[in-house]
Amino acid sequence: MAEQQPAPRAPLPEDRQPVIIAARRTPICRANGVLKPLRAHELLAPVLRSLLAGAGVAPESVADVVIGNAVGGGGNVARLAALEAGLPVSVPGLTVDRQCGSGLDAIALASRLVAAGGDGVYLAGGVESISTAPLRAHRNCDGEPEFFARAQFAPVSHGDPDMGVAAENVAARFGISRARQDAVALRSHQRALASAAAGAFDAEIVPVAVSSGPAGAVPAVGAGTVRADDGPRRGLTAAVLARFPPAFVAGGSVTAGNSCFDADGAAAVVITSLRRARELGASDGLLLLGTDTAGVDPQLLGIGAGAAGERLLAAHGLTAADLGLVEFNEAFASQTIACLEQLGIDPERANLDGGALALGHAYGASGAVLVTRLLAQARRTSTPGQLALALISSAGGMGTAALLEYRSLS
């Protein structure tokens, strides 16, 4: 008896159903490291070029380029990167800032443009060059600058904790031990190393040429090419993690070992309608079934993804048991555990190839990295109808979730 295929969920009409047919990313590398010579648009441009070539999309047919960015200098990096990538001047660009959620929210926005009847081809994702982010300053009454390390995310009346302090708040509120946090961090590194060795990242990574000259210089062929992530640590063990001191609060449980590190990188997808995807000859893809963004207490900002995911699953009548793949942005192990358990997802089931604890957190790009990973994993398992969930929390007490379904399009 033939295996029964899952019944299609009730999608939108084919000319309005968003589907992701390609996803690429740069290597994710430690800030102030090998990618330091490249500004944000220079990181993103090779990803956009690779997507167009791989998906067989004519540059002039792109309806818009929607890109998330969190700590850049403004000026619409989406438009700048599109032109840097060689897209014609007729193709516009839109930059989205929801801090860490920016890359996933850019994809969500592009999907809504398709669902609204756009029926066009969109490039959507995120980029972050923390290494070249501009210095920030307020202008005082006397006109002199007062420099600050980060933007304000919530009014003082709501509390505006630093990220690490908020991670400690989550650990305390939900009773998450240091041992559990360290275990999640170690597993992330071990999985990332094993997946890299098995070639799991090869097809999605766009090698990036890096010039040894000044920032802004055009990378010269042969000047140096970055081909792999540089975050996962081979020598990391439970004993090594146990030696890390608290990083943010005296006597706390959040350490540099069970927190992500800042990274540079870019990731983007090709998203279009199901009808257009078939015209382009796409053989498979991820249908975007829905997204949700939720707000939570800024003091517990790390749990925003859990709130968004809970609402999204409920809206579709689903539970954790219905999910085949889950990617969560591991900014901190404490919030990773808290959010996944809120959703009833065993942390062992998420981030099968490691997450941001090992690969790093390139702020505005990280949400798009999640989707890139999900498409690669879905193609690897090749299970039609498999559901996938991407989750990311954001500064200020927010979180975004996206529900996707793997489909054969042929």
Image (cartoon, rainbow, N blue to C red):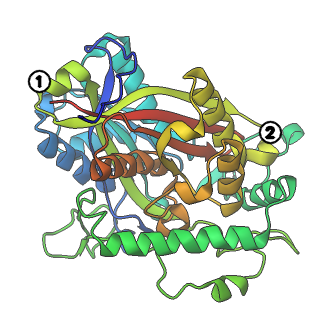
Foreground of the two, 355 or 324:
324
Q: Helix or strand or loop: what does disc 1 sit on?
A: helix
Task: Name the residue located 84 percent from the left edge and 70 percent from the top edge.
Answer: 252
Residue matched to label 1: 279
| CA gap, disc 1 and disc 2 | 45 Å
At 50% across and 65% down in the image, what residue appears? 360
Whichever of callouts 1 and 2 sits on the residue coming sooner in the sequence is: 1
Residue at the spot x=33%, y=44% of the render? 268
Q: Amino acid at mark 1?
A: Glu
Q: Amino acid at mark 2?
A: Asp
Q: Residue at x 75, y 69 (%)?
A: 254
Please tell me which residue lies in front, 403 or 368.
Answer: 403
Q: Position of residue 241 (x, y in %)?
A: 66, 82
Crowd tier of the residue under label 2, counting other residues whose Cα lies within 10 Å: few below 14, some 14–19, many 20 or above: some
Nearer the observer: mark 1 or 2; the answer is 1
Q: Residue furthest front?
A: 1
Tag 2's secondary structure? loop
Occupied quadrant, residue 245 = bottom right
Q: Is residue 30 visible?
A: no
Inspect this view and state whether residue 208 appears: yes
Task: Give the number of callouts.
Answer: 2
Residue that carries the numbered disc 2 in the rendered image = 297
Residue 229 x, y percent position in the rendering: 37, 70
Residue 87 lies in quadrant = top left
Q: Is residue 58 above or below residue 242?
A: above
Q: Quadrant of the C terminus?
A: top left
* Residue 386 x, y percent position in the rendering: 39, 38
